[in-house]
Amino acid sequence: MKNQTFFANNALLASGWCSKVRVEVCDGVISTITVNGDKQATDIELEVLLPGMPNLHSHAFQRGMAGLAERRGASADSFWTWREVMYRFLQVLTPDDLRIIASMAYIEMLESGFTRVGEFHYLHHAIAGQQYQNPAEMSLQLLTAAEQTGLNMTLLPVFYAHAGFGGLAPEAGQARFIHNIDSYQTLLSELRPIVAAQQGAVLGMAPHSLRAVTAAELNALLPLNDGPLHIHIAEQQKEVDACIQWSGMRPVQWLAEHVSLDARWCLVHATHVSEQEIVAMQQANLVAGLCPITEANLGDGIFPLPEFIANGGCYGVGSDSNVCIDAIEELRLLEYGQRLARQSRNVATTQANSATGDSLWLAAVEGGAQALGVPAGLAVGAAADMVSLTNRHQAAPLFATDNLLNNLIFCAANNLIDNVWVNGKLVVEHGQHPLREQLQTQFARTLTRILRQ
């Protein structure tokens, strides 16, 4: 890839807004950043430049079932009844189906400002649970979708072995997920060279949850890979109660006492945590992986954000079930959920007179990058994953940098997103991905066939 230079009249760096920022990119990586620089004739000139947003938690296949669980059942609905709909949906998905659905999801991510996805991937096997001839078949479909759409990928193959705490035998609906340590190790071995060959790709691991992994299996997994480590934890109160009944401890408490938590870990959801568990998370310098749209959709609850960030807790956001893919809406709902729960305002910032929109964007970029195993933001050595904004639809006062992200996040000004670059390559131009129309047609045909079965 040739060298590129960008000149932004305003850019959001880790230190905050800066003017006349010149960004030099070499082979898709930021090599130099100059503040108060001079524009050169060959520079790509932009009004506003933001770091792309990492999406730290996605189940791509669930984009295909968006809306299918929005019918009331015979009794009160919950995450657990939603899960039964999910199990039924995935029973018919082929590798081609997964690639098409994931491609549509990844296009929507890019258009909303996400530039890297953490794919928490557990749909490993064929419909009856048997392994494909290539045990990495479904992972390859996701990697192909990311490469073709231009989205950076942190692949998090999931180890899933049990249906409940204490090593309960898996249920029939979980047959496509199940691994033992040997088969999982084989999967990692197949994936390593493939991930290493794909620009920007990172390989991590994901023990699904304490429900799905025993203590012995968890300890056997940890030495198998040195990348990011993600786990679902404490998402639902029912899960917390079951963990206490099984072990006498809450989920995060149990995890902190049985493994060495550190900055490689991302605890996804962690909705129901105690004060002591918050402290343990902060001390480990790990990332809380928050998915506000999905957590609201499933009725999970609200993470205690103010207590967590008060002492430097790090968080990022993810689209999880992909019922609605929108980086801006994730940040908006994160703040609004806190306001509703606490009857307060501007909860996600801790500094007086600071813009809440700026705080949300920068925190989610930093935390998301850490969780996905890459350098964060507009910085030397980081991938040139960038988003430009346009003021062609906005009055000039609303486009002032001291209020720009407040306007973007809280005033539903999604049409400000203009161009998106990943590894320095333009993948969204004037708000639209070049493959959108083609993929929309394939996506519609695929869902029509699936839902007729």
Image (tube, helix red, strand yellow):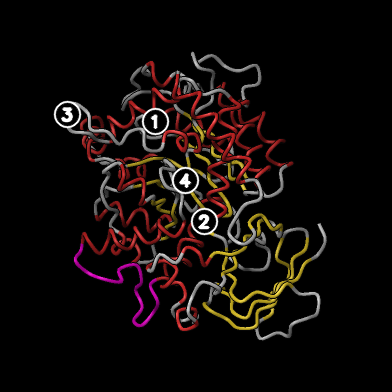
> Dividing the picture into quarters, in which one does residue 340 lie?
bottom left
The label on residue 30 is none
Q: Which residue is mark 3?
A: 75
Q: Which residues are magenta?
A: 342-356
Is 343 included in the stretch rendered in magenta? yes
Q: Amino acid at mark 2?
A: Ser
Residue visible at 67% across and 28% down in the picture: 190
The answer to whether mark 3 and mark 2 are in CB contact below 8 A is: no
The label on residue 57 is 4
Residue visible at 27% across and 40% down in the picture: 236
Q: What is the x, y in percent for residue 412?
A: 40, 64
Is 438 included in the stretch rendered in magenta? no
Q: Amino acid at mark 3?
A: Ser
Q: CA distance from mark 3 to mark 1?
A: 35 Å
Q: CA distance from mark 4 to mark 2?
A: 15 Å
In primary-sequence order, the first of circles 1 and 2 is 2
Above or below, 311 against 400 in this view is: above
Secondary structure under badge 4?
strand
Look at discs 4 and 3 and give the one toward the viewer. Answer: 3
Mark 2: few, some, or many residues within 10 Å (few <14, many ≥20)?
many
Secondary structure under badge 3?
loop
Camera-nearest residue between 118 and 62: 62
In the visual, does 166 lie left or right of 89?
left
Look at discs 3 and 1 and give the one toward the viewer. Answer: 3
Secondary structure under badge 2?
helix
Look at discs 4 and 2 and give the one toward the viewer. Answer: 2
Q: CA distance from mark 1 to mark 2?
A: 39 Å
Q: Which residue is mark 2?
A: 112
Q: CA distance from mark 4 to mark 3?
A: 30 Å
Q: Which residue is mark 1?
A: 215
